[in-house]
Image (tube, rainbow, N blue to C red):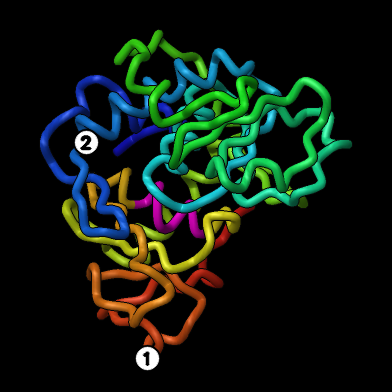
Amino acid sequence: MNAGTVDELFTRELRDDRIGLVDATGREYDYHWLCTSSWQAGNFLRHAGVREDVTVGVVGDGPLALLAFFGTTLLEGTTRFEPPTDLADADDFRALVAPVSALEEYDLPRGAQRVGYGSKPDAPDVHHFDAGIWTENPSFPPLAIGPETAILSDGERTVTHGDLLEAARAVLEETGLETDDRVVVRAPLSDPRAVAAGVIAPLLVRGVIVLPDDEGGAAAERGTYAVSSESVESIPEAKRIDLDAVSLR
């Protein structure tokens, strides 16, 4: 797909019943759900003040964590997966999206919003992500995001839309990843290389993002490719996308 920015992977004409995401339980989500739910997540996070030049922390690696990332992206914000708990001095930090049970572990700057998922928050000042996004408008206004717009941060570097897409396309060229191929993300999303290879690369070819199974049990094969820094003998999938080989400028 000839996308110049990541938001172009969520346009109306790309909504269909092709599978785009599989969660840790094996539940499948199609591209219609992925696009529409990402728009709803963006509309919801807008109420929390997410916009260009702000950072959103996202804790977790399930479907709602990915929706928080996609929604932030549509609003021209920057996502930081698994941020540190001490964020009081992070002036650009605008919102934290995390399981409700983990929210109190984080010290946020004044004015930053807490957005919880997984259970209903008791605190009145905590937004309920699960319930809130489904009440939002399932459409999104036209965007004008540039390739130089920041999309991810790991605390040390900032990655732009253009950087992330360039890295993802290099993965496609190296692996030959095709439509409907399943890519298991066996590396932390806090590493932008894992997002490039395990999330953006499959989206570019209409492949399937597969979230790993429970780390507490034996890993089972869930796709053809795995994004991992482990040796090929350590993963159940037949092919490995080496995290260390994914290049980001």
Q: Is residue 141 magenta-colored?
A: no
Which tag, 2 or 1, sits closer to the chain's start? 2
Residue 31's disc is 2
Q: Secondary structure at mark 2?
A: helix
On the rendered structure, is 96 left or right of 194?
A: right
Give residue 205's position: percent from left, percent from top.
26, 47
Q: Amino acid at mark 2?
A: Tyr
Distance between the alpha carbons at the discs numbered 2 and 1: 32 Å
Q: How many marks?
A: 2
Residue 233's tag is 1
Figure check: 146 above or below 46: below
> Residue 181 vs residue 90: left or right?
left
Q: Residue furthest left?
A: 17
Q: Position of residue 225 (x, y in %)?
A: 30, 69
As for residue 199 lying within the magenta part, the answer is: yes
Residue at screen point 53% across, 31% down = 121
Q: Main secondary structure of the magenta part?
A: helix
**Front position in the image: 168 or 184:** 184
Horizontal and vertical percent for residue 7?
Answer: 42, 28
Which region of the structure is painted magenta? 194-201
Q: Residue 158: x percent and y percent?
A: 69, 43
Q: Is residue 241 left or right of residue 87?
A: left
Q: Quadrant of the N terminus?
A: top left
Quarter of the image where one finds residue 77: top right
In the picture, residue 232 is in which quadrant? bottom left
Residue at (67% x, 25% y) in the render: 113
Q: Amino acid at mark 1?
A: Glu
Horizontal relation, residue 118 to residue 28: left or right: right
Q: Is residue 127 above or below residue 150?
A: above
Q: Compared to 95, does 30 lie above or below?
A: below
- Mark 1 neighbour class, 10 Å CA radius: few under 14, some 14 to 19, many 20 or more: few
